[in-house]
Every structure is written in C-alpha cells, then in structure tokens.
Image: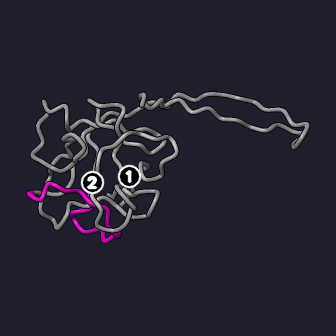
Amino acid sequence: MGQFDPTVTLLRLLPPFGKYGTMEQSSILYRDFVTSIVGFNDLCMQANGEAVWVVQCESSEAEQTWAVYPDGSIWPQQNRDRCLTSSDNHSKGRIIIISGCSSGSEGQRWVFMNVGTILNLKNGMVMEVKGSDPSLHQIIIWEVTENPNQKWLSLL
C-alpha cells in the first residue's frame, strides 16, 4: 500500500444540474501543523510502532512529534504513511493505535476541542490515558468526562 496523499480532489456539479451539468475539479493541498501533544501529568504523546502512549517529554524525541492536518488526521512526524486511529469497532475502551492512513476513515479524524479533549469524529468519544495510569502504556477512546486524563494540548 502506498503512502497516503494529503491532496484532496473536489468535484462540484455546476448548473444546470443533472444529466447536462458540468463538473469542475480542483485540488487542495493540506498543510500540516507539526507539534508535540502534551497530556496527563504533563507527559507527551509518543509513537512506538503501532502503539501510542504518554511518556516524559524530550525535545530530542522524534517519536513525540506529530503532524496535525486540517482534515483531522494526526500522523507521527517520522512515519507519514500512518495515522492515529480509533481501533477495531471504535467502541468505548478500545486503544488508540497507529495504522495506515485512509482518506475516508472517520476513525482517523480528530478534533482538538476548546475544553482540552481530542474528539474522534467516528464515535464522538475522546482520547484518554487509560485509568489515569501512564505505566499501562495505553491511550484509549472513552466517553467525555473532562477528567485530567482526557486533557491534551499541542505545543509549538
């Protein structure tokens, strides 16, 4: 499988619509925003193969740098063909993993909310450090509680 292309092709049907309408095509290149993502106990989100968890922040750690795109996808900076993904059936308690990017996957679309949570568009749940225990090495998807283990921010 090739690398995900962050260029989106838009098609717009111009009047007159229907059988005699014309199509207009344009492309938009999304620009990423590269950042560290800090969460519970001021720990940084870190990629580790297909796993993702929080650890002590280290500015020299490439695995703690993320590319956030306007389409809601979040990619490990060092592995641009993979995205943060709500795994399996996207139900409560499932771990967040890093898997191949798919332009149509809502399980890979995230929104940084004003209250500090990161919301998944597929299921309306948010990222959470499991059990408020970083030693478990898991970030999961959970219902919104706005507890400290669901709070995140991006750093320049």
Quarter of the picture holding the C terminus:
top left
| Residue 66, above or below 142 | above
Quarter assignment of residue 95 = bottom left
Q: Position of residue 130 (x, y in %)?
A: 19, 63
Q: Position of residue 119 (x, y in %)?
A: 39, 58
Which residue is depicted at the point 32% across and 67% down? 142
Few, some or many residues within 10 Å of mark 2 (<14, 14–19, 20+): many
| Residue 150, above or below 73 | below
Residue lying farthest to the front in this orientation: 1
Question: In the image, what residue type sits under mark 1?
Answer: Phe
Quarter of the picture holding the N terminus:
top left
Q: Mark 2 sits on what residue?
A: 152
Residue segment shown in magenta = 135-151
- Along the viewing direction, whichever of 123 and 68 lies nearer the viewer: 123
Question: In the image, what residue type sits under mark 2?
Answer: Trp
Q: Position of residue 64 (x, y in %)?
A: 20, 38
Q: Element type at marker 2?
A: loop
Q: How many marks?
A: 2
Task: Residue 137: say if magenta.
Answer: yes
Q: Element type at marker 1?
A: strand
| Mark 1 and mark 2 residues within 8 Å of each other at the beta carbon | yes
Q: Which mark is residue 112?
A: 1
Q: Which mark is residue 56?
A: none
- Left or right of 97 on screen, residue 58: left
Which residue is depicted at the point 33% across and 59% down? 117
